[in-house]
Amino acid sequence: MARIGFIGLGNMGGPMATNLVKAGHDVTVFDLSADALAQLESVGATAAKTAHEAVQNAEYVVSMLPASKHVLSLYLGNPETGVEGIVNAIPAGALVMDSSTISAEAARELAAGIIGQGRRFIDTPVSGGVGGAKAGTLTFICGGDAADIEEARPILEGMGKAVFKAGAHGAGQVAKICNNMLLAVLMTGTSEALQLGKAHGLDPKVLSDIMLQSSGRNWTLEVYNPCPGVMEGVPSSNGYQGGFMVDLMLKDLGLAIETAATSNSATPMGEQAQKLFKAHSDAGEGQRDFSSIFNWFGQQGK
Ligand code: NAD
């Protein structure tokens, strides 16, 4: 079993680190939140006082932070804020896996900075949501050297069921960004259709069942229905708490549009979804689960 340093114990990182403990690994964790640290300690992880301490004996390091700036600052430091990066605290030769969703450019910058200091790095963003993190069924979308990805596979399989190699460093993030842009389009489209049916007197549960057996079938209808009361155990039936925040989806759509600009790719659907989530966030809903976009459609024209 491996010695793992794990940084970032939020909605995703908390259950991911828990599953590594359950898989028998020796896991040392750090988060800025004392509650998140205490939760992991209660399931058998060792809580560190600093990120440096969490990684100092690690063979593998996993991070799960909000955005590019947090991950770059964690590993490489930030001269403006005086934060010292942890890269030199990690034992030489250890393998770093960053599972946060960040820009491909930031992932390549991390690869250069970490590998330049004699450690190894792969980008390992995930798909599958909080449900997948809890159940240990995440999909890992990796970028980096094939040998490093193969070495990481048993660790990643402690938290997920599928490990893909998308390409070189940064390619994991490009694939993840493409996936999340499509997810945003599916969630807004599904919400629009359900609200249209509801406005015409249809029961959203019946309409969902019909679309699930018809050509509109998609992941949001299968496991993440945005309409309250249709499905148990999803954020829409829990006041849109937990899950994947509107502001994180907005961050990912920003990454998608930036990535598209670098290749002159047309992304009008992604841009439309970005406008909708921005309007929803501006209305004060940024901290709710992204399926709450269903409510935005319900409030229009009223
Ligand atoms: P979150 O906000 O719930 O968790 C982030 C955690 O990082 C928090 O506990 C915070 O305290 C901690 N943190 C921030 N800066 C830190 C630092 N410098 N040192 C230590 N801890 C620090 O976010 P999340 O939903 O867990 O998402 C994490 C990443 O995973 C994001 O990049 C997100 O886009 C991606 N993601 C989320 C989902 C989802 O469904 N929530 C799905 C796939 C990918």
Image (cartoon, rainbow, N blue to C red):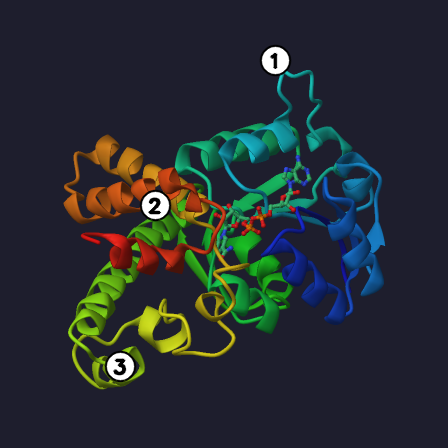
- Above or below — where is 50 with respect to 297? above
| Residue 54 image point, x, y percent | 79, 43
Q: Image quadrant of residue 32? A: top right
Q: Secondary structure at mark 3?
A: loop
Q: Verify CB contact (< 8 Å) between mark 2 and mark 3.
A: no
Q: Is residue 86 visible?
A: yes
Q: Is residue 168 visible?
A: no
- Along the line of sight, the residue nearer the viewer: 278 or 300: 300
Ligand 1 is within 8 Å of the C-beta of the residue at disc 1? no
Q: Is residue 30 left or right of residue 11?
A: right
Q: Image quadrant of residue 188? A: bottom left
**Which callout, 2 or 3, points to the residue nearer the camera?**
3
Q: Verify CB contact (< 8 Å) between mark 3 and mark 1.
A: no
Q: Secondary structure at mark 1?
A: loop
| Residue 189 image point, x, y percent | 22, 61
**For the point 58% across and 73% down, which residue is it?**
135
Ligand 1 is within 8 Å of the C-beta of the residue at disc 3? no
Earlier sequence position, callout 3 versus callout 1: 1
**For the point 71% across and 31% down, which residue is it?**
86
Mark 1–mark 2 Cα distance, whole angstroms, equals: 32 Å
Q: Secondary structure at mark 2?
A: helix
- Along the line of sight, the residue nearer the viewer: 91 or 42: 42
Q: Which residue is mark 3?
A: 203
Q: Amino acid at mark 2?
A: His
